[in-house]
Image (cartoon, grey):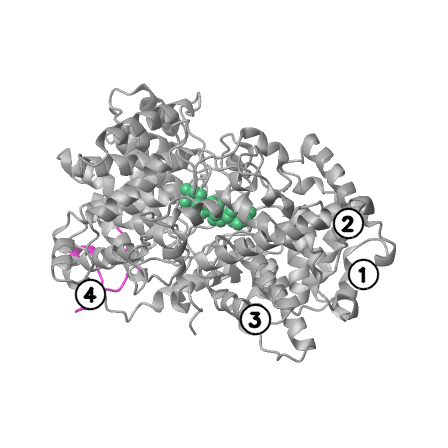
Amino acid sequence: AALAYGGDYEKGLMGGFNPMVNVNSKDKVYRLSMISKFMNRTHPDSTSVPSKYSPLVTGPLLVPSLTHTASTPEECLYKGVSFYRMLQQDDGGYNGDYGGPMFLLPGLAIVWYVTKECMERQGLGKEDVMFKREFREGGISYMRNHQQRDGGWGTHIEGPSTMFGTVMCYVAVRIMGVEREDEMARRGREFIRKNGGAGYTSSWAKFYLCILGLMDWRSHNSTPCEMFLLPRWFPFHPGRMWCHARMVYLPMSWLYCKRWVYPYADSDTLIKELREELYEEKWTEVEWGKYRTTVADMDNYSPVNIIMKTAQAGLDIYENNSLFSPIRNYLRSLAYPFVEEYLHAEDSQTNYIDIGPVNKVLNTLISFALSSNTPGPAFLKHAARVGDYLWVAEDGVKMQGYNGSQCWDTSFLLQALCEGGMGELFGTTVEKGMSFLERTQILSTSVSKSTAAYHYEKPKYRERYFRHVSEGGWPFSTSAHGWPISDCTGEGLKAVLCLQKLDRIKQATSEGRIKVISTKRLENAVNVILELQNTDGGFATYENNRGFGWFEWLNPSEVFGDIMIDYSYAECTMASLTALREFHDSYPTHRGAEIKAAMNRGSKFLKSIQRPDGSWYGSWACCFCYGTWFGVEGLIAAGEDARKSREVRRACEFLMEKQCGNGGWGEDFRSCYNKSYAETNMELYGDEDGACVVNTSWALLALVKGGMGGREEVRRGVRYLVERQLPSGDWPQEGISGVFNRSCGITYTAYRNVFPIWALGRYDKWRKEEGRGEE
Ligand code: LAN
């Protein structure tokens, strides 16, 4: 069974396993059954791999060994690639499990429920167009697997229970069909009631409760859509916010201002039951106004600032005092048309995928509401792309944090292969990868004039919908998604630049098997990057930083930190700088002076955010090992001499100091949360010494780059990677690697393959250049 549009079922199963609280015991069984799926697959490259490296090669079959483990780093490297290339998709990209957050599937379930009930009650058919029964059943298993011992659910799979996670998941399992007396439901309900009832959940969960008719809109803070009427120069304009915050604010403001509620809530028995289950007090006696400001401590990662609290109190009067209704109604009548047009623009620019999983489900609901609560054409287009976000894995069906990490993972792997000198050997893999990157670059001129991409790239529309230039950029996932990102563009560009030097790729392009990526297209990519540099010299994610630090005082989310503006990040800065450097080396005449100036400013920025202990904070993965790798790589690309640089030395010293007893590196998720280095929490994950392969690889990448290849620390780190490799050539999936908004973990299953391969490849190259033998 194909898992809809995002990927295929078999590969879904390969997606990787997250060691979370309840499912550990099944790990081994799943791994073996996954590998067996590949036993009969012939890979076109098999014959070119020296059999020395694939001990079980028989005839044209390359089969990962289930018993043999690598003994040298080089063998380990080839085994790692031999395994991982089998997971390449037919389109040349990679796809992996991108789950982690627990609050996403519930959003989908809630929108599915209200739309399906409306359709059914109006006699419009029962068909579950947006969320099929098999997936819902898988979703229930997912919830069962991730329920914690205390009965709650976390905000993400490895976090402790929060009211946010619990209320969302509880409501989700009930509406997906779990009975009130089911053990999981009973325990979940107890957790909620013990913590004061659903009124103490955080604002996003309250939002969904209001939609379902499980909470009165009085309990939700004002989310005025009038904000979009403000003039562009206004210091606090939604167009200045981080695009993810803006794109969630947009549908939320529409639904809030309309006070949209599931129209059959009052006559729905399940809703009536839930109204009893979620609160301590009787539903009819709840004083809704009081819940507007309540939130459980466990959810309150970034408490709402006093300034925002005051603003919210003022807005509460504006929303509920009849004195203001004429002006409110007037302003809203002006704002709705633009908000609706903007929602539509986002849908069509992204082919109904939308920038992320939250606005995806809210926009879907609005498309339904806008066609008088019936499944109109826009709703059906939305429904058709729900599958892009779903993933079938060992722990159940989940909604992913994005429509995948395809482009990002593929760019890393390809760079790793090139750097490790394996590009020619694994020719089919790189050829398919190159073709994927070619098709994934965001273009507006080569697509049909009738498509949204062509239309919206015009400056007039970009301006209108607060979009940055897209043409030439690379996205994180697919070109259909279409939002370019600084570092994804950087990594994509670097991958293309190194691939283009390979004979195999030259041959494939000259024979017409893959399309040429013209110099113009590379220049466009550089243009996207240069345009994205902030005035502080750093690079943010999708757009320039358009706001101010004080926007964070207005962060209403409670559960997330640093979400209001697009900040400059170490990671985005490094990827942009290294890409500019590589490009400049190959094409020195194109905007040469500007590129040099950009690199200088970028380098200064990186130095300015290096911490006194030599490390960099990583915002998008866990945590200081990740950030420090980016810092080192970025500085060196921007011209720092690894051997002489004080900054690079300090960074390397930081890393070496953090090495664990067994030679690996590891770090706890609390590093991200608390912004200070935390050793692995051994009770939860990691091996006996708290190290894991992903962090070890980042540390090794930084150290070898930083000129420490000959150090004992590096040799031991490499040894660690060899020892941790599984007989198949895969590495174990360990603790959650990714993070966003400081507090939410997100799984990157590709990291356990891509980064060990890259680190070993870099080490191997260094070793050969130094003329050293295998240890
Ligand atoms: C991502 C995924 C990719 C990631 C990198 C490219 C790795 C990073 O270097 C820059 C930031 C970026 C683009 C990023 C930002 C935040 C995202 C989009 C995510 C972590 C994927 C999911 C997350 C998004 C905000 C989740 C939806 C939840 C909300 C709170 C809106």
Left or right, 354 with reference to 72: right
Q: Nearer the viewer, mark 3 or mark 1?
A: 3
Q: Could you say where residue 596 lies in the image, as x and y percent from the top left? A: 26, 28
Q: Are marks 3 and 2 in contact (CB under 8 Å)?
A: no
In the image, the segment drawn in magenta is 52-70
Camera sees residue 551: yes
Residue at horizontal 43%, vertical 34%?
A: 569
Considering only order in the chain, which callout, 4 or 2, is on the residue closer to the N terminus? 4
User: What residue did someone put label 2 on?
Assistant: 218
* Residue 59 among those drawn in magenta: yes
Q: Does the beta carbon at disc 1 come under 8 Å from ligand 1? A: no
| Marking on residue 276 | 1
Instruction: Bin the neighbour count of mark 4 within 10 Å (Cα to Cα): few under 14, some 14-19, many 20 and up.
Output: some
Considering only order in the chain, which callout, 1 or 4, is on the residue closer to the N terminus? 4
Q: CA distance from mark 3 to mark 2?
A: 30 Å
Q: Does the beta carbon at disc 3 come under 8 Å from ligand 1? A: no
Q: Could you say where residue 96 lies in the image, as x and y percent from the top left? A: 40, 57
User: What residue did someone put label 4 on?
Assistant: 44
Which amino acid, by three-letter code, is at mark 4?
Answer: Pro
Q: CA distance from mark 2 to mark 1?
A: 18 Å
* Residue 774 among those drawn in magenta: no
Q: Quadrant of residue 13?
A: bottom left
Between 261 and 741, which is closer to the camera in this rendering? 261
Q: Could you say where residue 671 lies in the image, as x and y percent from the top left? A: 51, 35
Q: CA distance from mark 4 to mark 1?
A: 60 Å
Considering only order in the chain, which callout, 1 or 2, is on the residue closer to the N terminus? 2
Q: Quadrant of residue 87?
A: bottom left
Q: Could you say where residue 143 lies in the image, as x and y percent from the top left? A: 60, 60
Residue at horizontal 67%, vertical 36%?
A: 304
Give the prevailing secondary structure in the magenta stretch: loop
For the N terminus, the quadrant is bottom left
